[in-house]
Amino acid sequence: MFYNKLKQNHATMIARQTEIEFGTQFIASGSLKKIIRNPYHIREFETLNGIPDLVLITGAKLDAFKNFENKYPHIASTSGAARVFAVLNKKAFRPENDVIRLTGLSKSYFAKIIKDLLQIDAIEYSKIRGYRIRRDFELPSPKIISIEFKLDNWQKALVQATRHRAFAARSFVIMPAAKNALLRKNLDQFITFGISVGTFNPQTEEFEIIWRAPSNTAAYHPKSKISYVDSLYRIVKTLNQLQHATN
């Protein structure tokens, strides 16, 4: 009798979890390893496309970020620099007027960004031909994975996760196991928008991936490249906040 009552109280406590607590338990359970190998994560990571509850990168790419930070300690973390990188490449120079037009930056702000990038030898300039990325300059380029935790309202989670596809190779929605049937019923919506979906049982700590979307290449297309490169900058600047899943 007492044992059954204790189980009921425990179930009630779990049912009253906040999304933050739900996400915390998910991380502590070691379930991140089912999503990405050797995962490092940042919580409530601010991007140009919203604030995912969790952003993951693989530990195999961590050294690349650290080396980049050591080599370019003064690099600015701005969407302006990301816009410039999104329209330049290493092969052909692009005239200044074209870069300003394509980035949408004002001339004064463009001049500031260009000055910063020239100082760290990220780009090179030709008075006749314009600008291009230096051949020896390399941004870390990992696959980023975003996760949105939701206790209810799968539609809202889907909208948020879809926005995160601008920079993420995969974008997940994870909800309690009690929502498994509901998510399966609406799985076509997640497939249509390329969003991975899974459920987590706080009582058993079992994580089930209902559907894993193919890796998203849209993050490397010109329209989304700004968001992707900007996210890389932000990760470089928040390396001290990265946490390793040890379970």
Image (tube, grey):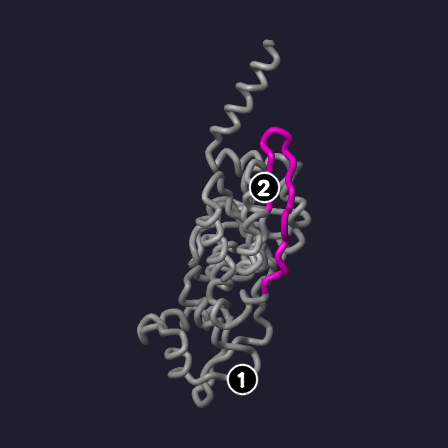
Amino acid type at image mark 1: Ala
* Residue 240 in view in this figure: no
Which residue carries the number 2 mark?
A: 180
Where does residue 160 sit, x and y in percent of width and height?
45, 53
* Magenta residues (range): 198-216
Please say if 177 is above or below 132. Answer: above
**Residue found at the very far front of the displayed protein:** 185
Judged by depth in the image, the label closer to the viewer, 1 or 2, is 2
Circle 2 crowding by C-alpha within 10 Å: few under 14, some 14–19, many from 20: some
**Total number of numbered labels?**
2
Tell me if I can see residue 17 in this picture: yes
| Sooner in the amino-acid sequence: mark 1 or mark 2 | 1
**How far apart are the alpha carbons under marks 1 and 2?**
50 Å
Disc 1: which residue: 92
**Is-magenta flag for residue 213?**
yes
Which quadrant of the figure contains the N terminus? top right
Report crowding for label 1: few under 14, some 14 to 19, many 20 or more residues within 10 A (C-alpha).
few
Tell me the amino acid under the disc marked 2.
Asn
Furthest-top residue in this view: 1
Q: Please state, as top left, top right, bottom left or bottom right, where the C terminus lies in the image.
A: top right
Observer-nearest residue: 163 or 51?
163
- Where residue 126 sits in the image (x, y, percent)? 47, 85
Residue at point 48%, 31% (across, down): 17
Rendered location of residue 194, percent (x, y): 56, 59
